[in-house]
Image: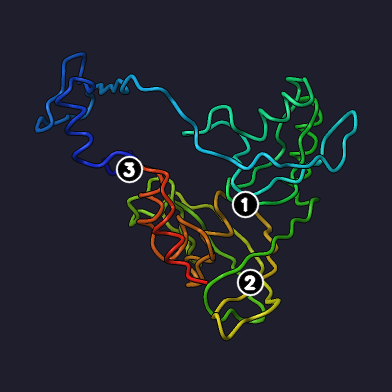
């Protein structure tokens, strides 16, 4: 259950007891041991699948024969993953433009709003991806974080899996290298600090493109992002959301 947190230990026990979990083709009991080399399979419950609600109000800012520039809203995944199969920006673009020749050049997290580039053929996808990799494209973000942030800060270090988190995909930043980490560089500057709310408004300039780079870096520096369930003040809100889709406790924790 630590590897797949969308089910609790009791949920997995129920799936085992109902015969949906097998080891090497045989039903696996909840108190059985799994050994290295065993093949474990799981058959999901036969329930109607319902995708979470997304914000489909994207805007095409520029459209040429080679590429698209799109304004992506928050709460919209870019491509199919996890619970999101059809309700994605990529699928919406293909349907609205009546074309399968739409290719993402880079990525944004589902909860992040911002400008995205999509290529209209494989050649331009590779060309534009190369421009991102060579840092010929400058990216700027704005973010709100808890706490009083320095006027300027350069976070040059490493990002990799956070082994202390029960969330499998959670990353962490460190100024020092650690196992399976990758180099990361992010520059921050303070736009405004609200002493009354203890919230800082930042401009962010990522120089590398690691998974969850901005969110993980700010969280590790002690300035969690406002409104972030995974890298916010309490990751238990993310586990609750992943399991039930309920955000009520999380919203209440934000206050005003």
Judging from the image, what secondary structure is the residue with disc 1 in?
loop
Q: Is residue 17 left or right of residue 139?
A: left
**47 or 141, which lies in front?**
47
Judging from the image, what secondary structure is the residue with disc 2 in?
strand
**2 or 187, which lies in front?**
2
**Number of other residues with Cα within 10 Å of mark 3, as a class: few under 14, some 14 to 19, many 20 or more:** some
Comes first in the chain, label 2 or label 3: 3
Mark 2 or 3, which is nearer the eye? 3
Query: Gap in Å between the C-alphas at discs 2 and 3?
Result: 34 Å
State the mark number for residue 154.
Answer: 2
The image quarter containing residue 126 is: top right
Comes first in the chain, label 1 or label 3: 3
Relative to 82, say whether 180 is above or below: below
Q: Is residue 55 left or right of residue 175?
A: right
Relative to 30, say whether 60 is above or below: below
* Residue position for label 3: 5
Query: Gap in Å between the C-alphas at discs 1 and 2?
Result: 22 Å
Q: Position of residue 94 (x, y in %)?
A: 72, 25
**Number of other residues with Cα within 10 Å of mark 2, as a class: few under 14, some 14 to 19, many 20 or more:** few
Q: Is residue 11 left or right of residue 135?
A: left
The image quarter containing residue 24 is: top left
Q: Residue furthest top?
A: 25
* Residue position for label 1: 112
Q: Residue at left 18%, top 39%?
A: 10
Q: Residue furthest left?
A: 31
The image quarter containing residue 128 is: top right
**Number of other residues with Cα within 10 Å of mark 1, as a class: few under 14, some 14 to 19, many 20 or more:** some
**30 or 57, which lies in front?**
57
Q: Position of residue 220 (x, y in %)?
A: 47, 66
């Amino acid at each position: 259950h630590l590897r797949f947190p969308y089910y609790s230990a009791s949920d997995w026990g129920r799936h085992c007891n109902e015969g949906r979990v097998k080891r090497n083709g045989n039903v696996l009991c909840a108190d059985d041991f799994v050994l290295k080399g065993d093949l474990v399979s799981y058959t999901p419950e036969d329930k109607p699948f319902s995708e979470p609600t997304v914000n489909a109000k994207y805007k095409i800012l520029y459209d040429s024969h080679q590429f698209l520039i799109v304004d992506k809203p928050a709460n919209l995944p870019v491509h199919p993953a996890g619970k999101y199969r059809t309700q994605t920006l990529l699928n919406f673009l293909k349907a609205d433009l009546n074309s399968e020749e739409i290719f993402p050049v880079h990525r944004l997290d589902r909860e992040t709003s911002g400008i995205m580039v999509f290529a209209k053929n494989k050649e331009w996808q590779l060309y534009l991806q190369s421009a991102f990799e060579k840092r010929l494209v400058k990216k700027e973000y704005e973010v709100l974080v808890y706490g009083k942030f320095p006027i300027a800060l350069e976070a040059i270090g490493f990002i990799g899996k956070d082994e202390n988190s029960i969330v499998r995909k959670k990353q962490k930043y460190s100024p020092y290298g650690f196992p399976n980490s990758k180099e990361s560089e992010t520059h921050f500057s303070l736009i405004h600090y609200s002493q009354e709310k203890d919230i800082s408004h930042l401009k962010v300039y990522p120089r590398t493109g690691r998974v969850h780079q901005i969110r993980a870096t700010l969280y590790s520096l002690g300035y969690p992002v406002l409104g972030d369930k995974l890298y916010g003040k309490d990751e238990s809100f993310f586990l609750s959301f992943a399991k039930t889709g309920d955000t009520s406790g999380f919203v209440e924790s934000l206050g005003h």
